Image (cartoon, rainbow, N blue to C red):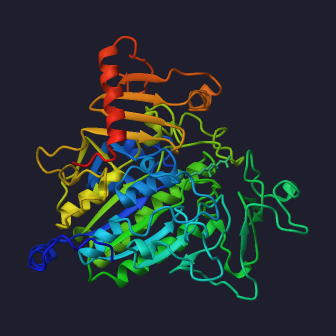
Amino acid sequence: MKSLLLPLSLPLLLSFSVSLAAEKPNVIIIMADDLGFGDVSAYGGTSFPTPNLDRLAAEGRRFTSGYTTASTCTPTRYSFLTGSYAFRRKGTGIAPPNGHMVVPPDAVTIADLAKTAGYTTAVIGKWHLGLGAEGRGPDWNGVIAPGPREIGFDYNFLLPTTNDRVPQVYVENDRVLNLDPKDPLWVGDKAPAGDHPTGISHRSTLKMDWSHGHNATIHNGISRIGFYTGGHAARFRDEDLADTWAKKSDTWIEAHRAAPFFLFLASHDPHVPRMPHERFQGKSGLGFRADAILQFDWQVGEVMKTLDRLGLAEKTLIIVCSDNGPVMDDGYQDSALEKLGHHRAGGPFRGGKYSVFEGGTRTPFIARWKGTIQPAVSDEIVSTIDLAASFAALIGTPLPEGACLDSIDVSGALLGRPGARGREHLVQQDNGGTGNYGFRVGPWKLVRYDTKSARNVVVEKTLANTPVPQFQLFDLATDPGEQHDLAAAQPGRLEQMKSRLATLIAAGRTRP
Ligand code: NG6
Ligand code: CA
């Protein structure tokens, strides 16, 4: 397994495991999908209650400067697992249905670190990091590798891509679950030959219409990105995703209650297509987006119940985070915007998903470890990318020199050790490839758009096709909404921030 152990002598390793064995907490990372800062009532949302998240926050540490590393899914997940900024590696933007795994099998991931320290590891839920080898992609009808197993996960139960992309099947331990070999699964980016109903040809039959893209193969009355045929016995109902993952998590946690365990539970809520279980539909009064958030809240509550039932709450560190900020219309006509009312999914922040303004990456971030973390609110800066180094520090696993290049040990801030600080600076990116960055140092925030086209793209809905300056500077302490550009008023600070960001990008790493 990797070269993780090589630099250490055996006696040193043994002393580590002996001294820490008794203290190793279980770790559960619950990642929401497109959940905004203002979507949780503990973060000031008033349009609908999120009682389980609120309880978790009340019993733990709620971060007001908790971040994802990117404002889309794949780069945040890549950075979370590898502890390295996704902009450092090509091809880590939003993964297509047949995309190969973007985390190289020889990378040291947070799951590898856990395994080295004797943890049993699992990932349950949305993957969206590609599967299979470069140049080949996933072999849907065979063993799908490389995948999570090659990067440190003992068990995997996956939604392989994201649910607005094909196919709607689960992958369990590297194989499509319930696949009938007589009905092979085919996935492609062009329509198969013959009469293949799509969101365009059969639009009137859809139970939820599309608004842009998402008009290829239809499954469960919803058309998707990409095409597929076959695998009928393996297909799931969108409405059952959260229930299935809740059950799988409960079973897996119970089965591994005796070992220290590491679980990455990746929800799909409230990503499109928003099709929560029938019992949540209509519950919020704000449409399916908010209903899906209630479902996410329920999912978090189920994990808490499992821990209580097994007496593990004091032995388990739970982190709840998002993968990027919120979005309303992301390709389906689900009334998210029409039914929004006064709800502000991004809280006080500007922008959301796809943006390097704060709303794109500053999201709910809660750490609970009953009996160890004292309940509090913290303004320290922490990011999903820091979980690898922080977790390694917590369990006494040294980080190999060439791994986790941008992961900072913020374990002190996560646990609330007196005087412990979070990050000093943070680079934010969008989907990558466009050269859009946010750069936060203390209260200061630089926004940088590298290319002319990036400066003309839709960085937020109201800016569509409106050119914006290449560099903007904001003081988040007085202007959290990034409304007052201070670039012209503070040229010295602007230059300093510009050059520091350029240096950090060029340096290839930010971990000391
Ligand atoms: C975009 C999709 C969007 C969503 C996103 C990925 C279109 C027009 N838009 O390309 O619907 O799927 O990719 O979201 O197709 S993420 O949260 O998984 O990054
Ligand atoms: Ca996402």
In front of the other: 13 or 351: 13
Residue at the extreme top of the image, as rendered: 489
Residue found at x 87% / y 68%: 193
| Spot occupied by residue 389 in the image (x, y as percentages of width and height) | 26, 57
| Spot occupied by residue 402 in the image (x, y as percentages of width and height) | 28, 59
- Residue 45 seen in render: no
| Spot occupied by residue 464 in the image (x, y as percentages of width and height) | 64, 28
In this rendering, position of residue 301 left or right of residue 231: left
In front of the other: 427 or 510: 510
In front of the other: 365 or 68: 68
| Spot occupied by residue 394 in the image (x, y as percentages of width and height) | 19, 62
**Splitting the image into 4 quarters, where does residue 121 fall?**
bottom left
Residue found at x 75% / y 84%: 183
**On the rendered image, what quadrant is the N terminus found in?**
bottom left
- Residue 141 seen in render: yes
**Splitting the image into 4 quarters, where does residue 130 fall?**
bottom right
User: In the displayed structure, would residue 499 be above or below residue 27?
Assistant: above
Residue found at x 24% / y 59%: 401
In this rendering, position of residue 466 left or right of residue 118: right
In this rendering, position of residue 494 left or right of residue 374: right
In front of the other: 74 or 32: 74
How many numbered badges does the structure rendering display?
A: 0
User: In the displayed structure, would residue 47 be above or below residue 239?
Assistant: above
User: In the displayed structure, would residue 119 be above or below residue 467?
Assistant: below
Residue at the extreme right of the image, as rendered: 195
Residue found at x 72% / y 60%: 226
